[in-house]
Every structure is written in structure tokens, then in C-alpha cells.
Amino acid sequence: MAARLHAHILAAALDQFVRLGADGASMEGIASAANVSKRTLYARFASKTDLLVSAIEYGVAKHLKPISASIPEGSARERLRHTAIRMLDASLKPEVVSLRALATWIADHEPTLHDAVQKLVVHNPVGVIQSILEEGARSGELRFADSYFTAMFFFDALVSMPRDRILNRLGLQDRQPAKHAYLDRTIDLIWTGVDALKGAGA
């Protein structure tokens, strides 16, 4: 019951923060939207910023868990392609775009919380890619010195860069054929380097 109420409050808070922004949302408005008292809200969250961080965590998990839970069997390349497509699609959803904007607000207004929020919006999805790469290394398909750095590189190339090109209208359309073609060409390019490193015994 308590866990269900907690999730209900976070869902209502996330909706308020997404629609009104960090400055526009209020504890009173969130309490009203969640149909709970302000006392109940403050008993669980010490401040609006505390609630905002928890709402971002809730939102990231809401979009990331279905992706990490549905990674298919297959080669590292196949699994990376499947995961990158789903991450790119998710990153373009209005709610996820808003989550990144809220994370930027925290970085600007609450610098001490920057690292914690970055872990939620960047390190967590990168960690999903990292697990695929490490399994690929164990099977002999991949070779690298630093799994996290490599995962961040893949995330930037396959998710961050195409997302930004689409959102900023820089020659990539938010259409499945266009996104799939972009990711296939990018993975082909990266895998040329992967094969070269394997051949060189790096």
C-alpha cells in the first residue's frame, strides 16, 4: 500500500514537473494532483527539489526498464542495434525530452545534486550498453580496455548524436526508416574499427 502510494505520488509529480517545469510546479499543486495532503507529501519528500530528483528517477526507470528487460539473445552487434533503436525512440518522447530539461535545471540550480542526477539520466542507460559490451567481450566478440568509456562512446554515437540531430532538425528525420538507416551505417562504421582492433590483437 505504501509503495503504491509512493509510486502514485511520483507519477503525479512527474506529470506536474513535465507540464509546468521545475519553477512552475509547486508542492501544493503536486499534492492536489496526487490527491494527498501537503503533510503526506512532506512526510516523504523534504523539499520540492528532493521530490524532483525522485520524480526524475521514477521517469528514467519508467522508460529504461522495458528496454533493459527486452534485450534479445544474439551477437553483441545485434543486441546493441536493438537496444540503440529502442533508446533512441525513447529519447525522443516528449516526457524524456522534458526529463533531460529538468536534469539541466537541477544542474543549474542545485550543483551539489548534479552528479546524482547525471547518474540517473546518463549513467543508467550507458550501464545497459556496458553490460552488452562486457558480455560481448566474454564471448570474444569484442575487445576494449575500458568498458564504461566504450559504452559511453556507443551511447553518444547511437543515441545522443542522432537524438540531437533530430530535435535540432539537422538533416535526420524522426521516421523509423531514417533512424534505422542512420544506426545501421553508424554501427557498420564502428564495427570496422572493432574488427581492425581484433585483427591487430589490441
Image: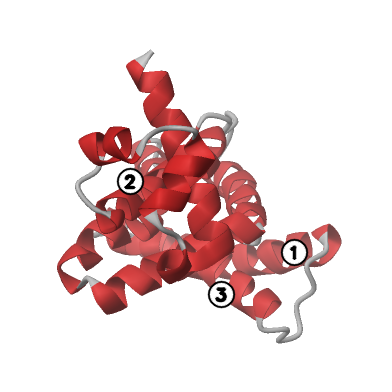
**153 or 11, nearer to the observer:** 11
Question: What's under tag 2, amino acid-wise?
Answer: Ser
- Mark 1 surroundings: few (<14), some (14-19) or many (≥20) residues within 10 A: some
Question: How many circles with numbers are drawn on the protein?
Answer: 3
Residue that appears at 62% across and 52% down: 90
Sequence order check, earlier mark of 2 and 3: 2
C-alpha separation, residue under disc 3 versus residue under disc 1: 12 Å
Query: x%, y% of residue 7?
Result: 43, 30
**Classed neighbour count for the residue bearing mark 2: other residues with Cα under 10 Å, few (<14), some (14–19), many (≥20):** some
Residue under label 1, please give it.
Answer: 179
**Residue at left offset 63%, top offset 45%:** 82
- The image shows residue 6 at horizontal and vertical percentages of 37, 29
Q: At 29% across and 73% down in the image, what residue appears?
A: 107
Quarter of the picture holding the C terminus: bottom left
Give the position of the N terminus as an image quadrant. top left
- Quick check: 34 above or below 177? above
Tell us which disc is closer to us: 2 or 3.
2
**Which residue is the site of mark 2?**
54
